[in-house]
Image: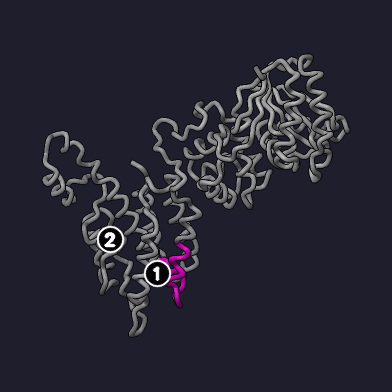
């Protein structure tokens, strides 16, 4: 029976005592398996750089690093990181391994296909060479064919951990700038990004950024779920990691494009009022539709008919302690309007205020029917386009990536309205009041 097993998957999921890290001899771990080892084992990387600096690691030599969780056998497959791997380099290293693995105490080992991913040696050529040498060994050996879709435990831990933090907490704990955090969250929501290697290829996420990030994750490893590939957050947190959920960067771009639809000659203190008003209507409607059935679960258990329960859903007093969205303000109603759009949007805002008197009238300062001279600031045609634009995304909590994403988006929307402070009584003050209201409403119960 052969001691060699060929596996399509992720090398780092192996249970072997030792894994092989393919390296060069000039002290660079900038791509592929080497980069992943650099992020996972920063102490090993520092020692590797020093070895290369002192010219103590050459082709045909093997350096074994013993970490607490596994051993890593550093195997040079090229001299310069910019060059290609060579068959003779593979043969020298494999010959050295066969002659020394027992003396090193290696009892099982997992290899990548040497020199294939970034070294440009054809996979089948490398496999044939590896099998020819490794069949001489008497220990279990795994050879991993790289699979970009395979589970990556550390990558999954990263996603799970970040799912439990607000954006500000991520910035505070990782010391990354806001722009890098935005890029990171957008990358994590990309269904094509499943591994650390793929994450490293995202434009703007430099190696130094990833080092900061994974240093933090590894340092907090004891607080992370133990099951590889788990996407459930810790106790008392809702599941928020979903590749289809809206990210902050997507939402900010969505709001920017909304502004482009209506801005015309208006300054930001004007057009952002209308974007904010539309965001209010869409988010509250989506969240209300998402939550309202949960308020009546007890009535289902009491045996009330579906018709009776549906009737109760239309009474605001049934939602004590929660906001209520009347029919005039619901998104399906807004989407169905064909004429007098501005007037009906004002009615929708007014109905929201009437149903939720504790809000203090903060939404009534938004007037979609406002005029400049004899003309409306926003004609119905643009309002129809704006409604269609906001219909692209659902905005309930279950549809967004992080629970404070809406709060961050509200900040983005009004952040430069402060420039209008000299306009006494300007819409800026109303915006801040709306902002405070929405932050309270957006906070999970």
Residue 42 as seen in the image, left or right of residue 400: right
Viewer-proximal residue, 253 or 416?
Answer: 253
Q: Which residue is denoted by mark 1 in the rendering?
A: 426
Mark 2 neighbour density, 10 Å: few (under 14) some (14–19) many (20 or more):
some
Which segment is the magenta one? 255-272
Which of the numbered marks, if any, corresponds to residue 361?
A: 2
Q: Looking at the image, is mark 2 or mark 1 earlier in the sequence?
A: 2
Q: Is residue 352 visible?
A: yes
The residue lying at 23 percent from left, 44 percent from top is 293
Residue located at (12% from left, 46% from top): 307
Q: State the quadrant of the N terminus.
A: top right
Residue 347, image x and y in percent?
24, 66
x, y percentage for residue 440? 35, 49
Give SS at disc 1: loop
Q: Residue at x 45, y 45 (%)?
A: 402
Q: Is residue 93 above or below residue 445?
A: above
Can residue 357 be seen from the camera position used here?
Answer: no
Q: How many marks?
A: 2
Q: Quadrant of residue 430?
A: bottom left
Q: Residue at x 25, y 62 (%)?
A: 333
Image quadrant holding the C terminus, namely top left
């Amino acid at each position: 029976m052969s001691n060699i097993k060929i596996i399509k998957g992720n090398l780092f999921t192996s249970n072997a005592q030792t894994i092989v890290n393919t390296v060069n001899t000039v002290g660079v771990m900038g791509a592929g398996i080497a980069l992943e080892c650099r992020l996972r084992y920063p102490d090993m990387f520092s020692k590797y750089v020093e070895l290369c600096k002192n010219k103590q690691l050459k082709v045909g030599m093997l350096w074994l690093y013993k970490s607490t969780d596994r051993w890593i056998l550093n195997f040079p497959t090229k001299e310069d990181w910019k060059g290609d791997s060579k068959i003779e380099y593979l043969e020298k290293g494999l010959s050295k391994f066969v002659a020394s693995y027992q003396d090193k105490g290696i009892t099982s080992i997992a290899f990548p296909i040497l020199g294939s991913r970034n070294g440009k040696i054809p996979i089948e050529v490398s496999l044939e060479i590896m099998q020819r040498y490794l069949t001489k060994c008497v220990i279990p050996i795994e050879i991993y064919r790289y699979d970009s879709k395979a589970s990556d435990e550390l990558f999954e831990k990263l996603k799970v951990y970040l799912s439990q933090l607000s954006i500000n907490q991520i910035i505070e704990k990782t010391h990354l700038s806001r722009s890098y955090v935005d890029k990171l969250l957008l990358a994590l929501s990309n269904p094509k990004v499943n591994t650390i290697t793929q994450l490293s290829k995202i434009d703007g996420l430099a190696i130094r950024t990833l080092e900061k990030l994974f240093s933090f994750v590894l340092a907090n490893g004891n607080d992370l779920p133990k099951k590889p590939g788990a996407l459930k957050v810790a106790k008392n947190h809702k599941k928020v990691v979903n590749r289809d959920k809206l990210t902050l960067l997507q939402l900010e771009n969505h709001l920017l494009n909304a502004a482009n639809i209506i801005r015309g000659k208006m300054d930001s203190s004007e057009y952002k009022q209308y974007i904010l008003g539309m965001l209010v209507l869409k988010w509250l409607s989506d969240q209300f539709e998402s939550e309202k059935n949960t308020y009546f679960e007890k009535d289902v258990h009491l045996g009330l008919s579906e018709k009776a329960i549906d009737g109760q859903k239309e009474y605001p007093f049934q939602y004590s302690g929660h906001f209520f969205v009347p029919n005039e303000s619901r998104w399906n109603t807004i989407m169905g309007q064909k004429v007098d759009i501005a007037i009906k949007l004002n009615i929708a805002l007014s109905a929201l205020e009437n149903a939720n008197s504790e809000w203090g009238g903060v939404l009534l300062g938004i007037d979609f029917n406002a005029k400049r001279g004899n003309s409306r600031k926003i004609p119905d045609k643009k309002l129809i386009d704006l409604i269609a634009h906001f219909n692209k995304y659902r905005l309930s909590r279950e549809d967004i990536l992080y629970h404070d994403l809406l709060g961050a988006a509200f900040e983005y929307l009004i952040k430069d309205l402060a420039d209008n402070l000299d306009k006494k009584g300007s819409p800026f003050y109303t915006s801040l009041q709306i902002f405070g209201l929405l932050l309270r409403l957006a906070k999970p119960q």
